[in-house]
Image (cartoon, grey):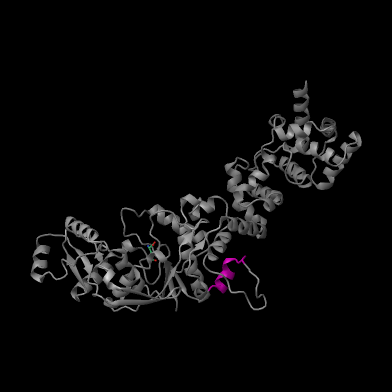
Amino acid sequence: MMRVRFAPSPTGQLHVGNARTALFNWLLSHGHEGIFILRIEDTDAERSTKESEASILEDVRWLGLEWDEGPDIGGAHGPYRQSERLHLYTSYANELVGGGHAYYCFCSPQKLESDRKSDLAAGRPPRYHGTCRALPPEEVHRKLEAGEKPVIRFKVPERVDVTFQDLVRGDVTFNTEVIGDPILVRSDGRPAYNFAVVVDDALMEITHVIRGEDHISNTPRQVLLYRALGFTTPKFAHLALVMGPDHTPLSKRHGATSVSEFRERGYLPEALTNCLALIGWSPRTDAGSAGTTEELLPLAELARRFALENVGHSAGVFDPEKLAWMNRHYMKASAPSRIAAESSRYFQARGFIRRKSDAALAYIESILAMAVGSVDRLEEIPDRVAFLFAYDARAAIARPDVVEVLHESGARDVIAALADVIATPLLDRDAFRAVASKVKEKTGMKGRALFHPIRVALTGESGGPELDLAVPAMDRGAALPPDSGVAKIMSAAERARAFAGAVATHDS
Ligand code: GLU
């Protein structure tokens, strides 16, 4: 049974690079009926926070990467927070000390610092000098009795090659010459990452460790620890880092980097997972579709096709343009009721709806056709239909684009005629067309000269969605009861009169 894990440290928001690591673990386990575990690596008490843990869990879940075992749902290999597993690390550390694989180190910070300086001065990479490696047992005993608080260090075998199999990079070999004896347990009893991760991965029966390549130099230390503890070594896969469009590691300089920022901005989770999956991996095209690049793959389809063999070992680029393109696709492909629900908070933020009532959601759903085809993100939807909620005739006639339309010949006649003939609510395209015909008859204007002034009068803008959709949307909105949850919307007739009035006042 394949068992994989995502093991974030709760020290901030979930970065998209880490989200990709979670995704690759999830995809692999789902393609193999495996188990996906979420483990919180919170032994760094100063930097770990509960808020960060909660937000990471929320983001992973939002991405659709549900876990089978984890801190909130438990499982047979728990607990799933390292801070709740300290007794396990202590017991394995004692076992290593007892077996001669680890030892107490009493070196002071000053001594370590001066060793480091002398290494650097001699042009050597700094590493622990092994001072306490061979302390006589009586001396160790005496120091412990005297209340000294040592660290526990791993006794790394000298000058041996450590080779591990990496499913992305092939065999990787490090010589222990470059590895100083790492700390396993700090003087306050907290385990170091390299130690806790081995104890946990072994006890949680992890079969495949898939993580960022920033951990590759840790792996030989971990492999040696598996051996010393008599555990089976899992398979490893180190994923190349995610780069920005300029080929430097993706960071704040490139804009949004955390999953929650992308969520805030109105990307759909399947667009983000689709986009992240294609960084460093590409689907093998199915037989019959040879040569076509099928890039739009929702999560379930990604899981069906994902294979570690097809993960490249060179860094991949995160392309915001591609994400926007994918998001447009998934917004169009989604049920309008879902897009209405997902975008409702942006309408609320703008004051366009007051509550997410059924009526408000239904109204948003009914106006989406005017927006969804022309935006990249959910957050941009309210702006496309703002004319419905924030109509102001006086402000409109001061806008340069509207002024330009008002200067077109016959425009004022159209506006006056419109205010005159418009009466009953225009609830569909035909009702609106009938009014437009009457204005045409009265003024002799047609085409652009007819519809341009009508548009500025009713929407307050010179551009925007089709009037055939926009006008009925106004009148449907105006017909909503005051307690519907939707902010007040002016009817087409009210707009026509207000606009004609504003133009007349301005002219006089
Ligand atoms: N807590 C480590 C990190 O967030 C996990 C590394 C690993 O997967 O082994 O980088």
Q: Residue at x 69, y 38 (%)?
A: 489
In what quadrant of the picture does the C terminus appear? top right
Q: Is residue 145 magenta?
A: no
Q: Position of residue 77 (x, y in %)?
A: 37, 71
Is residue 70 at least partly visible in the picture?
A: no
Residue closest to the eye, 190 or 348: 190
Left or right of 192: which side holds 380? right
Relative to 38, residue 1 above or below: below
- Which residues make up the magenta segment? 295-306
Is residue 290 at least partly visible in the picture?
A: yes
Relative to 420, residue 235 above or below: below
Left or right of 40: which side holds 245? right
Q: Position of residue 86 (x, y in %)?
A: 28, 64
Q: Position of residue 245 (x, y in %)?
A: 53, 56
Q: Residue at x 71, y 49 (%)?
A: 370
Q: Position of residue 215 (x, y in %)?
A: 38, 66
Query: Most extreme residue toward the top, as rendered?
Result: 508
**Quarter of image, res 290:** bottom right
Q: Is residue 301 magenta?
A: yes
Relative to 437, residue 17 above or below: below
Q: Quadrant of ligand 1?
A: bottom left
